[in-house]
Amino acid sequence: MVFSSFLTEHLSDCTLCPRLCHVNRLAGQTGYCGQTARLTAARAALHFWEEPCLSGQEGSGTVFFSGCSLRCVFCQNQEIALGKSGREITISHLAQIFLRLQEKGANNINLVTPTHFVPQICEALRLAKQKGLTLPIVYNTGGYERVSTLRLLDGLVDVYLPDMKYYSSELSLRYAYAENYFSYACAALKEMYRQTGSPIFHSTTGMMLKGVIVRHLILPGQTRDSKKILRYLHNTYGNEIYVSIMNQYTPLSEFADFPELNRKVSMEEYQRVLRFATEIGIENGYFQEGETASESFIPQFDGEGL
């Protein structure tokens, strides 16, 4: 396989994510994400479970990439985060997938867990745009990013959809082996906001065309950490970003080493965090109604659309 100079520059000594693995992925080596330079994805289809301003009625054109540089112990997408599912595709084929999703009526192109494939995605986006791709591009990430990697996307990505998972370094170390998560997530969010600015919505459809939506998933017993995150977001960005407060944490299996995770988030815990968000003045946001943890937010990673 022949790699461009752009790919060679960023993949021969990989430092795309904060893990700084320094592996030569072009030579087949893998770092924390578990992926070589060969582009791998598990699904590409219309997705209806994102925030309303992304999914709408038509769906978000979502591409789920294999591997992950964060890999939280409670991840709902562990099957692909650990690289157990996925098919190898070329950059030109990825560009065609983007165009095919546009033809299906998608509201946007939604790149899920893309960090470790950013150079390949950049090339695919440029190629697809040359061939007529006009949809907004959504970068859907766990928030564990390097600013230098995000700058590669400047001018290519329209909407950033990062998680802000942990305020406490103890929690991020315990659940993601990433003690420095919060500092990287904050720096990443600052760069995302610099690129997009204030949110812009389509005048008739209400779909987000540009902006940042920060997701926060409440964990069992961690409402104090959640409040610290919401206070930081509001003190720093006010209502210039949207905040999506989620209660869909689902204990998918028994955690022998993490017994505190073996339950859903209670309605009282969720309401406590929502009340706090209102009290501090968060106006632009989303919350989830009902027993979302009992619903399936996990699609089949069966290669659909690839």
Image (cartoon, rainbow, N blue to C red):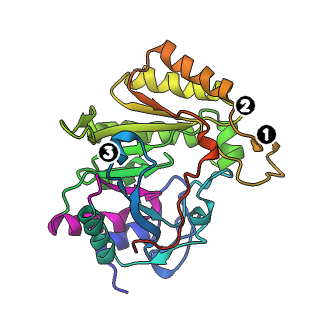
**SS of the residue under disc 1:** helix
Determine crowd level at label 3: few under 14, some 14-19, many 20+ residues with C-alpha closer than 10 A: many
| Residue under the point 59% across and 41% down | 292
Give the magenta part as a residue range: 105-132
Q: Disc 2 versus disc 3: distance between alpha carbons? A: 31 Å
Say which residue appears at 23% left-offset and 55% top-offset. 135
Amino acid type, label 2: Gly
Left or right of 154? Residue 131 is left
Q: In this view, does 211 lie above or below 296?
A: above
Q: What residue type is labelled 3?
A: Val
- Is 249 left, or right, of 9 in this rendering? right
Cβ–Cβ under 8 Å for marks 1 and 2: yes
Image point (49%, 45%), residue name: 143
- Residue named by callout 3: 159
Q: Do the residues labelled 3 and 1 touch (CB within 8 Å)?
A: no
Q: Where is residue 187 in the image (x, y as percent from the top left)?
A: 44, 38
Are there few (<14), some (14-19), or many (20+) residues within 10 Å of tag 1? few
Q: Which amino acid does label 1 sit on?
A: Glu
Q: In this view, does 176 lie above or below 78?
A: above
In the rendered image of this protein, does residue 168 appear above or below residue 34? above
Q: Which badge, 2 or 3, comes first in the chain's sequence?
A: 3
Upstream in sequence: badge 1 or badge 2: 2
Q: Which residue lies furthest to the bottom in this view?
A: 1
* Residue at x 82% of width, y 50% of height: 257
For mark 1, what is the residue? 260
Say if residue 213 shows up in the picture: yes
Q: Which of marks 3 and 1 is nearer the N terminus?
A: 3
The x, y position of residue 25, in whole percent, is 48, 74
Residue 179 in view here: no
What residue did someone put label 2 on? 221
